[in-house]
Image (tube, grey):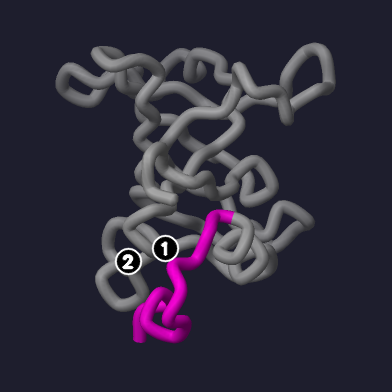
């Protein structure tokens, strides 16, 4: 059952964020079973690095990068927050809970596939002009 259907008022990002604090985010494969409200988008705080030599750097025209801890230790900065589509998830068995592969829109024309994004770097935001 869709989470939006459980409440007659549109859910906001903070409502969805609270629900997914300790449960895995929906992937492209699972979201049809429990879609997010249409006024809410998935976003991640991203700092990235190139993938190690020997690992694929591109997938077709898409650049592939790895999530990385920011050098300044301040992950949660607004200029690091990007709207994403979550493609896949992997249970980590550690304090990160799940790691995700995301497709991140870095600009209107630049998209990167980012691997190993920890659950703690993911959040939800309200889409513009939906309130």
- Vertical side of 98 occupied by 35: above or below: below
Check the picture and name the quadrant holding the N terminus.
bottom left
Residue 53 circle label: none
- List x then y, in percent, for residue 78: 64, 23
Nearer-N-terminus badge (1/2): 1
Which residue occupies the extreme right position in the image? 73
- List x then y, in percent, for residue 64: 37, 23
Distance Cα–Cα, label 1 vs label 2: 5 Å
Q: Is residue 7 magenta?
A: yes
When asked about the image quadrant of residue 4, the answer is bottom left
- List x then y, in percent, for residue 40: 43, 52
Left or right of 16, for residue 28: left
Residue at 80% x, 23% y: name it.
Answer: 74
Q: Point out the stretch of residues depicted in magenta.
A: 1-13
Q: Which residue is mark 1?
A: 26
Left or right of 47, for residue 41: left
- Which SS type dominates the magenta stretch? loop
Q: Which residue is mark 2?
A: 31
């Amino acid at each position: 059952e869709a989470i939006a259907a459980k409440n007659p008022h549109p859910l906001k990002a903070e409502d969805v964020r609270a629900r997914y604090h300790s449960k895995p985010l929906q992937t492209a494969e699972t979201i049809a079973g429990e879609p997010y409200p249409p006024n809410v988008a998935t976003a991640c705080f991203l700092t990235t690095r190139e993938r190690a030599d020997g690992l694929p750097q591109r997938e077709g025209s898409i650049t592939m990068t790895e999530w990385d801890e920011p050098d300044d230790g301040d992950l949660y900065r607004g200029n690091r927050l990007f709207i994403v589509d979550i493609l896949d998830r992997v249970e980590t068995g550690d304090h990160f809970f799940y790691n995700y592969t995301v497709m991140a829109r870095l600009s209107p024309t630049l998209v990167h596939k980012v691997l190993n994004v920890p659950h703690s770097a993911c959040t939800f935001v309200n889409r513009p002009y939906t309130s």
